[in-house]
Image (cartoon, rainbow, N blue to C red):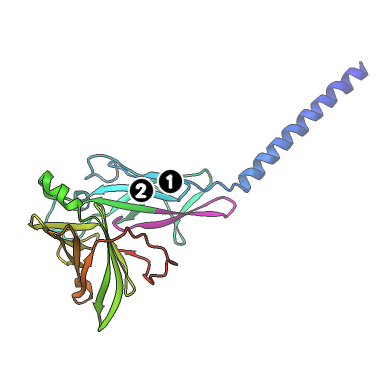
Amino acid sequence: MKTGIKKYMGIAIAVCVGCAAVLSSGCKNLTDSSEKALTSFAFKKDINSWLKNDIVGTIDQAAGIVRITVPESAYKYDNLSKTRNRKFKASFTVSPHAKLYKGTAEQKSGELEDLFIKNKEYKVVAKDGSEKTYTVCITIEYVVPTADPADTETVKQFYGSYPGKLRFDNNDYAICVVCDQEKLISYSQAMSAVYTNMQWTKVSTTEWICKTYSKEDFKRENVKNTLTFRAGTDGKITCKLIVNAMGNAPSNEMEKGADYTWAPDDGKGFKGPTES
């Protein structure tokens, strides 16, 4: 009998020790949790009443990038007398026990409010203090006039890279303009910028003008660059740039060349492009 009692007491003690170990381990994991993922990010219509649908971002965890596309119309008030742009309230989720910060300020889902026009950086801080930075990349769907399909195909021939020289402040600077359907990037030794707010105008079947504006300039009032693209009878494609934001600094007539991708150590001396 005594042997049986000792046996069961031994089992009970072992079970208790095991449970204590599990609980201790669980508490330690909770205290030292290093999970720091941003798991969702959206502009929801229930707290942004003017939206017709939720605008949901897609998250690339490996790159730490949230991509979210917003129609231009969503920034505008129905009351046309209001000249400013709307702000959005963002809803988000993060890993259990983690928190989201903008700078040193903790953010709350449904209360985080901003214009969300230019890209934003946030950091998710885990329970153990480790952190991960996420960039919310905003793509704006600008309103564009309905184009003739033939014109759309014509414009595509102007997409590409144009190396040349920019005359500014009595100096010649190396420059390269890179243009595609979604953006125009002006790389130079003086300054570099990327533009997604573009307006194409047809001059003739062989000549088009592209004007660029700041991302938030929905009325397109302040031109940053004016580019004239031409298709010659000899098959050459050229681009002439006027940087309106730099006192109408002109480039030479730049011929379309090999595709260019910027790298800080490529020897060109171009500054890294900033979003405009």
Judged from the image, the secondary structure of the residue bearing numbered disc 2 is: strand
Determine the residue positioned at 80% across, 29% down.
14
Q: Nearer the viewer, residue 17 or 177?
A: 177
Residue on which the image places disc 1: 60
Q: Residues within 10 Å of mark 2 (few under 14, many from 20)?
A: some
- The furthest residue to the right: 2
Write the start and end of the magenta stretch as one range. Answer: 116-135
Q: Which mark is residue 224?
A: none
Task: Name the residue beneath numbered marker 2.
Answer: 67
Q: Residue furthest left?
A: 204
Q: Quadrant of the C terminus?
A: bottom left
Foreground residue among 258 and 45: 258
Hey, what amino acid is under mark 2?
Answer: Arg
Asked whether 239 falls inside the magenta stretch, the response is: no
Q: Locate residue 82, reporting x and y percent.
A: 15, 58
Residue 175 vs 229, above or below: the answer is: below
Marks 2,1: beta carbons within 8 A: yes
Q: Earlier in the sequence, mark 2 or mark 1?
A: 1
